Image (cartoon, rainbow, N blue to C red):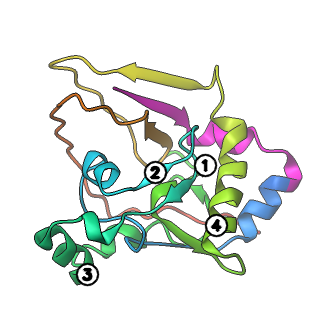
Amino acid sequence: RTTLFASGRGAYEALDPEDRRFAKTLYGRFGPNRTCDESVAVMHRAGARLDADGLALVAGVDDAKLDPDQLQRKVADSNRRRWDHYGGSPVRIHPRTGETVLFATPIGLESYDGYDPVASSKLLADLLRPGTRPPLVYEHAWRPDDVLLFDNRKMLHSTTPCTPVKHLLYQIFIRTNAPMGVPAS
């Protein structure tokens, strides 16, 4: 299994000027309604699917495939705040570098104002696609004992299709009080 990485700044810069202006006008809502607070592998076993290039959620989690504890965690939505910082425009200003980046997660997108969930997913995929094509993508093939560090606020990342091979991945999150900025329209 591998993980794909692309620069959020590079993805923004790959857009033509009209798409950059349009992206700034979007207001997205993100949350766990189509996913659950579980690993990608668990969500995959429960029916969640991204499109072939990993840029749009084409099928959400089937609640019937979750065990009672997983379903309760999803319904209780105790970790809703993990999605709050994604809300708004996919165009953001990085708080430390000042770079303009595309900042969004296809798996958590519920909708953009004025668009239904399917149209919203397609819209986000269309915005991400120019900056997530080779040679702008780094593909990391995981091996035992690998350590990989990246800034989640300026890197787009997606796993390749899930495989039945068992693996263990530890994630460490460093919290910050520096919010992503919103560019002037």
Residue under label 3, please give it. 75
Determine whether label 2 and label 3 are within 8 Å by CB: no
Image quarter in which the N terminus is found: top left
Q: Which residue is mark 1?
A: 101
Q: Is residue 8 left or right of residue 20?
A: left
Q: Nearer the viewer, mark 2 or mark 1?
A: 2
Are the residues flagged by discs 1 and 4 in contact, CB closer than 8 Å? no
The extreme left residue here reads 69
Q: Give, as a three-letter code, the residue at label 4.
A: Val
At label 1, the amino acid type is Val
| Marker disc for residue 118 | 4
- Distance from Cα at disc 2 to Cα at disc 1: 25 Å
Which element carries disc 4, helix, strand or loop? helix
Which span is picked out in magenta? 1-18
Q: Earlier in the sequence, mark 1 or mark 4?
A: 1
Q: How many angstroms separate mark 2 from mark 3 (CA)? A: 20 Å
Gap between marks 2 and 4, in whole Å?
13 Å
| Magenta stretch contains residue 16 | yes
Q: Nearer the viewer, mark 1 or mark 4?
A: 4
Which element carries disc 2, helix, strand or loop? strand
Residue 172 appearing in the image: yes
Please identify the residue farthest to the right as the structure is shown. Answer: 18
Query: Label 3 vs label 4: CA separation?
Result: 22 Å
- Lower sequence index among marks 2 and 4: 2
Q: Nearer the viewer, residue 184 or 56?
A: 56
